[in-house]
Amino acid sequence: MRFYSVGYLYLLLALPLFLALALLFGKVRKARANRIGNPDTIGRLFGRVHVTNANMAMIVFLVGLAFIIAAMARPQYPGGVERVEARGGKVVIALDISLSMLAQDFQPNRLEKAKREIIALVEKLKAQSMGLVVFAGEAFVQCPPTIDYSAFRLFLDVASVGMISDTGTDLADAINVSTVLLDDGSNVDKAIVLFTDGEIFEGDPEKAASEAADKGIRIFTVGVGSNSGRPIPEMKGASGLKKNSEGEIVISRLNEELLARTADKGNGKFYRATPGESELDDIYADIKGLKGEEKETKFRTIYAEKYRWFLLPGLALIAAASFIPMSRRDEYDS
């Protein structure tokens, strides 16, 4: 068994804290009751907490919550093996993870929008070998070209702003690193697809694209952003906005002209990301024709989703906890 979204399992660490807070609340409640009056009198009037039942209800609730968290992490079991052949060319996706990709031209932000489009594109290009490069002020290989799309998806999921300490955006380095990754001497068609807002502070992307084109590698650019622009959050999850040295809020805008020139130098095309994602059909039409003289054949394990095995018991346990009586009213003496 494996968990596809392992990050949710960290929520399990909060359960002991939840239990400690519940116990603390119980003690505070008992102390307040004792200050009001005699415990026996209060028990006859308002009822007394049934400690055993209350503890049992808490345990059942927490176990149910643990099951639901496990379900959120998407447990998967091996469901067989399938043969996969990649007959197309090789494609490297270059994803911008600079701070400006947190701007909210799209919801929740540019980076998540780019990830959604990449996932949809990969689903369309299943005959291609796919690689992933992430970049900000520098670029590095996140996933070498592979036909194991589940592995590609895992590497894409963890890509986030802050992974690269070098701030800024260097499109040229992203193209150069992707070119080195693709320039392996194989006689297959190759392409680089950049998802970025086009705001650069370093390098010459047009020169890098031209050099890649000389090696038979086409460059496609997808602009993720808007001409009107949006403010940039200081960091992921923060409420503050980035400001310049004069204290003015920085507005990040799509650099459409640069991305179009870069794609033109790379014998490719520029596309603008849209809410309806209609551009994906155009990108697919251009890339699906990549020819591959080499055929890569592998066997990969198919995983079946088993979240229901955890979700249903979790919901049942939480429901059961609500039916456990946690208080009782003392009887008056005859």
Image (cartoon, rainbow, N blue to C red):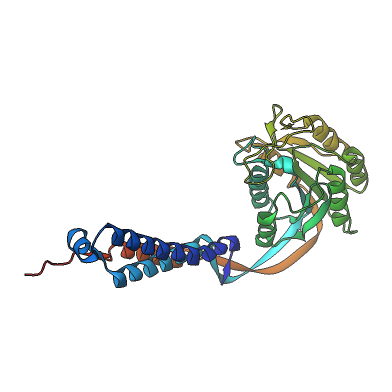
Q: Is residue 79 left or right of residue 233?
A: left
- Which residue does the image show at 71% across and 41% down from the upper left? 101
The residue most toward the left is 334
Front residue of 128/309: it is 309
Q: Does the image show residue 284?
A: yes
**Can you give x and y, in whole percent of width and height, for residue 137 in the image?**
83, 47
Q: Looking at the figure, which quarter contains the C terminus?
A: bottom left
Q: Looking at the figure, which quarter contains the N terminus?
A: bottom right
**Can you give x and y, in whole percent of width and height, for residue 220 in the image?**
79, 41
Q: Is residue 19 left or right of residue 102?
A: left
The residue most toward the top is 228
Front residue of 216/197: it is 197
Look at the picture and state if 150 lies above or below 110. below
Front residue of 201/249: it is 249
Displayed quadrant of residue 269? top right
Displayed quadrant of residue 181? bottom right
Look at the picture and state if 97 lies above or below 292. above
Q: So how many labels did they put on this image?
A: 0
Q: Is residue 331 left or right of residue 293?
A: left
**Can you give x and y, in whole percent of width and height, for residue 154 in the image?**
66, 59
Displayed quadrant of residue 5? bottom right
Q: Does the image show residue 306?
A: no
**Can you give x and y, in whole percent of width and height, for residue 244 in the image?**
77, 33
- Which residue does the image show at 34% across and 67% down from the upper left? 57
- Which residue does the image show at 60% across and 61% down from the upper left? 7
Front residue of 188/172: it is 172
